[in-house]
Image (cartoon, grey):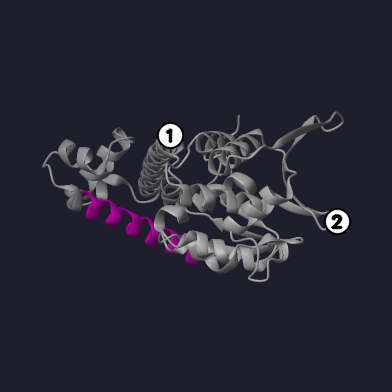
């Protein structure tokens, strides 16, 4: 199962003890993947349709526990795609209206609100109900990428009104949710790992949160190790390149001018570098007849390099 599926499986098994929180979560699910069907007699039926078994199971549980009503369950299998569709149906008119009224999915005139939007946030005034509502919308229409690859949490909405409502609720928990248009839908999303940890905490998906934190710690450790290795590799390459250039300059001086004509300190430095081509500046300083520090070694090597460049310039001028 995917990481996203694990989150849904975890939160689908949670049931808030308070009835108002149960209604808030059910309102979110109906708003995101529900539909109201009106027959020729004006009788209403409520249908929740989903491809996710966890959503179907949670919808069934909430309807039975919260309203104590009988619901029908239907499953359709698409053999070509290898997927199943679950339908939770409240057929009785009085029961359907009772659910819609409690979930505030009817307007003051008793009509179904356009696109089944929750009216005036009445069912999500309390912080606990906001948590339940976010659980519901993620169950019904949310997803999360594999954190091993990237951090991306999103909820797909059918309208801007629903997207803005979810964004506003998330911002109540200091979550900096953004909205982007994708084809014919709106997507409310989070991209930062720390923010996604926070939203899992808000939805009370604590097991998934701990799994995500473990992945983040391992990724941070790997990144830290890689940075150190890259830094050390760069330093080694830099040191090797500098040593190669120093030896080239010394060899050039030896071939053109001769090392015996150098001042004693520079001659000692040149011969030591030729003898120990892989030594660091600190090691070179300790190997000299009269040991010096790194700055002293660096100064002498720079003088040798300048001397080689002067000779090359004169050789070029002579040519």
Q: Is residue 227 magenta?
A: no
The disc at residue 207 is: 1
Q: Which residue is mark 2?
A: 41
Instruction: Tell whether 35 sits left or right of 301.
Output: right
Cβ atoms under marks 1 and 2 closer than 8 Å = no
Residue at 39% from the left image edge and 59% from the top image edge: 309
Magenta span: chief secondary structure: helix
Residue 11 pos. (x, y %): 51, 38
In the depicted structure, whether residue 170 falls above or below residue 202: below
Which span is picked out in magenta? 297-319
Instruction: Tell whether 53 sits left or right of 183.
Output: left
SS at circle 1: helix
Residue at 21% from the left image edge and 37% from the top image edge: 283
* Residue 212 or residue 278, whichever sits in front: 212
Marks 1 and 2, the one that precedes in the sequence: 2
Residue 74 pos. (x, y %): 77, 33
Residue 208 pos. (x, y %): 46, 36
């Amino acid at each position: 199962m995917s990481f996203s599926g694990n989150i849904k499986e975890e939160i689908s098994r949670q049931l808030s003890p308070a009835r108002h929180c149960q209604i808030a979560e059910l309102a979110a699910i109906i708003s995101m993947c529900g539909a109201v069907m009106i027959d020729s007699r004006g009788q209403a039926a409520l249908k929740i349709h989903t491809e996710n078994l966890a959503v179907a199971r949670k919808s069934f549980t909430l309807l039975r526990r919260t309203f104590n009503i009988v619901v029908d369950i239907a499953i359709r299998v698409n053999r070509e795609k290898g997927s199943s569709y679950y339908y939770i149906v409240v057929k009785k008119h009085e029961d359907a209206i009772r659910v819609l009224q409690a979930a505030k999915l009817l307007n003051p005139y008793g009509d179904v609100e356009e696109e089944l939007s929750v009216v005036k946030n009445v069912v999500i005034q309390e912080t606990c109900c906001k948590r339940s509502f976010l659980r519901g919308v993620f169950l019904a229409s949310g997803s999360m990428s594999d954190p091993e690859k990237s951090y991306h949490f999103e909820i797909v909405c059918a309208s801007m009104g629903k997207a803005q409502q979810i964004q506003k609720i998330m911002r109540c928990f200091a979550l900096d949710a953004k909205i982007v248009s994708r084809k014919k839908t709106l997507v409310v999303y989070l991209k930062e790992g720390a923010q996604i940890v926070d939203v899992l905490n808000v939805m009370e998906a604590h097991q998934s949160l701990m799994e995500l934190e473990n992945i983040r710690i391992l990724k941070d450790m790997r990144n830290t190790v890689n940075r150190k290795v890259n830094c050390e590799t760069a330093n080694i390459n830099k040191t090797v390149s500098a040593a190669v250039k120093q030896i080239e300059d010394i060899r050039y001086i030896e071939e053109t001018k001769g090392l015996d004509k150098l001042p004693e300190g520079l001659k000692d430095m040149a011969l030591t570098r030729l003898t120990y081509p892989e030594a660091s500046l600190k090691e070179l300083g300790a190997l000299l007849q009269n040991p010096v520090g790194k700055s002293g070694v660096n100064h002498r090597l720079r003088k040798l390099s300048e001397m080689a460049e002067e000779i090359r310039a004169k050789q070029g001028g002579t040519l």
